[in-house]
Every structure is written in structure tokens, then in C-alpha cells.
Image (cartoon, helix red, strand yellow):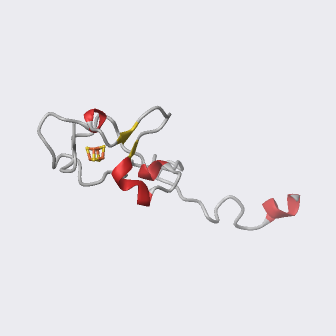
Amino acid sequence: MGWLNDTPHSGRVGRVTGRRGERRPTEPRGYAAPPGTGPAGETCGACRHILRGRRYRKCELARALWTHGPGTDIRARAPACRRWEA
Ligand code: SF4
């Protein structure tokens, strides 16, 4: 389908890019509440609600929001949210 690449806008239409032509990495935002609103010194990694045993980290309390993508991941090192439990 070479004719597709001969159009005047080929390579331009539909690009979602940053300044250098690269897409920024998706920030994990799958937290049950804002990180840092929980007990001082605790992290998601020490919380009972973190989903373990997978390549990615998710918060069980945010399960209804999961999208199968990195936008609903969490970071184990994120400071605990107010729903943190040991
Ligand atoms: S601290 Fe616990 S409840 Fe809060 S986002 Fe992290 S894993 Fe979920």
C-alpha cells in the first residue's frame, strides 16, 4: 500500500508526540487515594492492598478503574495513601 505514504500528510496525522517526537511515558495513577495522605514512612509496597506476584503493580481497591494499561498501575515505592493497611 505504497499510495498511503505518498499522501501530503504522511507521517504527521495522528501523532501524539512530545517536543522531540517521542511520546512521554504514562504516569501510574492507579492509587486508591492520593499518595502521601497515609501514615508517614509507609509505602504501597508494604500495604495489604497491593497486588503481588505480577510484572506490574496494581491497587486492589482501585480494581473498578483498571484498564489493562500502565495508567492504572501504581509504584511500590509510592508513599502510602490514606487507605493504607498493614
Ligand atoms: S497505600 Fe495501599 S490502598 Fe493506598 S494506593 Fe497504595 S496499595 Fe492502594
Front-most of 76 and 4? 76
Image position, residue 31 (x, y; %): 32, 51
Report which quarter residue 62 is drawn in: bottom left
Front-most of 52 and 81? 52
In-image side of 48 versus 64 (left or right) = left
Report which quarter residue 9 is drawn in: bottom right
Image position, residue 67 (x, y; %): 50, 56
Residue closest to the far left: 40
Front-most of 47 and 70? 47
Position of the N terminus by quadrant: bottom right
Front-most of 40 and 18? 40
Question: Which of the four quarters of the rendered structure image does ligand 1 lie in?
Answer: top left
Numbered marks: total: 0
- Please name the residue shown 25% across and 55% down the image: 33
- Please name the residue shown 33% across and 35% down the image: 76
In-image side of 68 versus 78 (left or right) = right
In the depicted structure, whether residue 36 falls above or below residue 7: above
- Please name the residue shown 51% across and 51% down the image: 69
Position of the C terminus by quadrant: top left
Image position, residue 28 (x, y; %): 39, 48
